[in-house]
Amino acid sequence: MSDLRSSIENASPSRNKWPLVAGIAAVAVALIAVVGFTVARGDSADRAAGGGEPVRGGTLEFALLDYQRSPDPQLGSNYAESIVTNNIGDKLVWQDPKTGEITPWLAESWEYNNELTEFTFHLRKDVTFSDGTPFNAEAVKANYDQFIRGDEKLEILPNGARLFPGYIGTDTPDDHTAVITFEKPLASTLQAASITSNQQPVFLSLSTLKLSAKERTDPKKVIGTGPFVYESWEEQVKTVLVRRKGYNWSPPAIGHRGEAYLDKVVFNTIPEASVRTGSLESGTIDATLDVGTTDEKPLATQGFKVNYRGVSGTAIRFDFNVSLFPTNDIAVRRAIQRGWDREAIKKTVLTDSYSVATSILDPSVPGYADYGDSVLKYDPEEARRLLEAAGWIEGPDGIRVKDGRKLVVKLLGISNLVVNKPAYESIQQDLKKIGIDLQLTVVPIPDWTAQRAKAQTDWNVTAANSSRNDPSVINLTYGPLLGNSSWLKKGTPEYDKALDVLGKIETTLDPAKRGEYAKAAQDLVLDELALTNPVYNPSQVIAQAGYVHGIIFDAQSRNNFVDTWKSNGR
Amino acid sequence: MLRYVTLKVGRALFVVWAAFTLTFVLLFVLPVNPVDLLFDPAEINTIPPEVRKQVAENYGFDDPVIVQYLDRLGHALTGDFGNSVQSGRPVTAAILDVLPSTLVLASGALVLALLIAFVIALVATSTRHAWVRNLVEALPSGSVSVPVFLSGILILQIFSFRLSWFPAFGGEGARSLVLPLITLAIPVSGPIAQLLVRSFATEFHSGYVTTSWAKGATRGGIIIRDVFRNASLPAFTIAGITFGNLIAGSVITETVFARKGIGRMTQIAINTLDVPLVQGVVVLVAVSFALINLIVDLIYPLLDPRLRATLAISIPQAATGGLR
């Protein structure tokens, strides 16, 4: 009894000391860490740069955030999946990342009827799958049929349905001609056939197409025509590709001939940002995607190359809900477009890899027009004037009021990009100065998706972007029969106008006409109806060691390693 | 005794069933249509309705909720939790695929944690210096207070990026296991050590120790021969908590060290709201949890004669309870 008491008595004072002692221990651990950090630092070994003649051989250790959920390339819907896919499979056509032009790839040439409902592709004759079977019209038909329609028995989803709406079928008049037909004009067909991003029309061998979704999780059975073939796939960990022998059909526009330079590419999944950069610094990996904005500068000063490309498609934008108070008032929408300081965001939030939006489209998309000096210019005076004229009077707390209702705008955004929240907060502060209360709800993707279902009745603004390097992305996003992201109501003049103006983009492939329609579409969504407030253009950023060369960013800002090589060839 | 066993087994089964049902209810109460999650969120409005319908049919999302529940429960009983929405693979296969690497990590970390805990308890009990005891006794709460995430990154910075002793990511070879083991063992050792320190102290001051002293045993001898055996047993009672810590810690450890495993899969499954996969993992965890507690309940009477005695007495008492 006395023992128990004494042990309790002894225990209590020592317990009081615990936090202190723990604190000391924590400080000690931190000190050791800092010492270890500084001591071992300073050896920036062989990071010698240097271009010159490409060297063959070697393994590229590449790091990224995400991983392939399945080796089935037509299924992929994240960056890891689309990048791996681009290196094991080819498409009919290649979109030039600089000009946006559609150029030959597995199809040497193509033509289409005037109505743009029928597209004829003339295929290369020397292409084979990695199992030796020929790539021909039959393969195109089988792939497109399954990609667009899915196959219930095999549990293959209709992954391509959204790219090719109104697909009737593919005819094969001869072995190397494929004719794809649609119910209605689809000018974006050519670009859709080139897509290298999510759920892309990549070609699989006939033997692969017969496999069920389950069977396609065996990477050895997934056969493509690309510059690399699967060696292994380990979910959550890595995908390993090896060079395809005899490959000789990379897009002519790239200027690469023959097989890939690298023997092997390892896609290492590293979810933690500091581990990705740490592994790059310590030389365990050669290059990493998904470089955070705060890591760009430190890595560049250490001699790593920061390689980036804007994501072609729409900017990260605020889509206004035109059927919900107060964003149903066009004066409010226009005031928001003009009410925030672009310079502030550029200086405090974005890095050089990102840019402030000057249109709904990223500048790399064909048909882009610059609105940076008109609608999308910081002009708080004009914004105030617009609000005053529309009857919005400043209330006692600085927030404007009309008919007894406050100017509160509720925004739903995604937190997946680190830049989003600080950028939105900067806008929030600026808008407060002109009397608009922008309320932010910035959440992870699944929560966003859940809330998005209620966007029509609950949210004034949904913030997102869409990646597709074609002006038809405007129609896809705002077309009343398609995305209808601003919830235009049937029967209103705005609805009919949007249907007409945006729909036109799908009716021509004449560059001049298409440019004209794309301009009209941008005028409509930015100025006339003010459906959206573009914020910034997101980027994909790679940091790579000096000895890594030739990582291609394609037109969808995905990477292709056919032309990649390492100075050391290791 | 049979009654005791049936009771415990019944309780374990109930826990597993409840976990299954609860996740089902939770996932269906969520304000999200599972079909939406199958597509790129930015392009959800562009998915033609007939495609949505076809997808819903494929996954059975269009059946009435009760039908879906019974269907899933029936399949779950045969070990079939459906296919992962994200990858299309069977949930059971996906789990079995990553389970071994988590088992290796968790069991290794458990052994290491026990080692750490016993060393702490032994040092705290055997030392004659108060300051050493205070320092050592502070370690368990310290180890629980430092987030696994932070300790993982620190350990990585020092031993992998700076000293290059161990690989920073991946799961190849024994060397890649070292840092994750340490990272995971630290927080897991905390509660065990705290419990052991207390129970070592209690046993050290009990009557039989005084007897040993009187018989002239040395301090070391007493601790090893008498105290160690009796004081270790209570560590079993927190096996459930330990298991919970291992699972929670493995989520972060596996993410930081880019290892495949149940923890990381759970995190991703929740992030992507992969309904069947989440359910499979929850049931797996529930089964393991119930199983561990069941084993502890069943084994403890065998290890501790006192408990066996009370059990033997309590059963006839309960049986005759109605007569009194």
Image (tube, coloured by chain):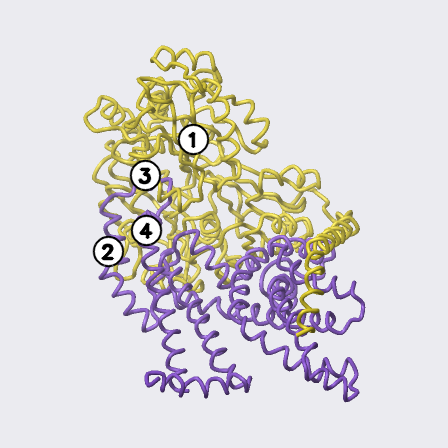
Chain colours: A yellow, B purple
Mark 4 neighbour class, 10 Å CA radius: few under 14, some 14 to 19, many 20 or more: many
Identify the amino acid type marked 1. Answer: Gln
Mark 2 neighbour class, 10 Å CA radius: few under 14, some 14 to 19, many 20 or more: some
Distance of label 4 from label 1 (alpha carbons) = 49 Å
Of marks 2 and 1, the one in the foreground: 1
The mark found on residue A439 in the picture is 1
Numbered disc 3: what chain?
Answer: A
The mark found on residue A189 in the picture is 3
Q: Is residue A70 visible?
A: yes
**Percent position (x, y) of residue A295?**
62, 41
The residue that label 2 is drawn on is B57
Of marks 3 and 4, the one in the foreground: 3
Q: Are marks 2 and 1 in contact (CB under 8 Å)?
A: no
Q: Looking at the picture, does residue B113 appear above or below residue A555?
A: below
Distance of label 3 from label 2 (alpha carbons) = 28 Å
Identify the amino acid type marked 3. Answer: Thr
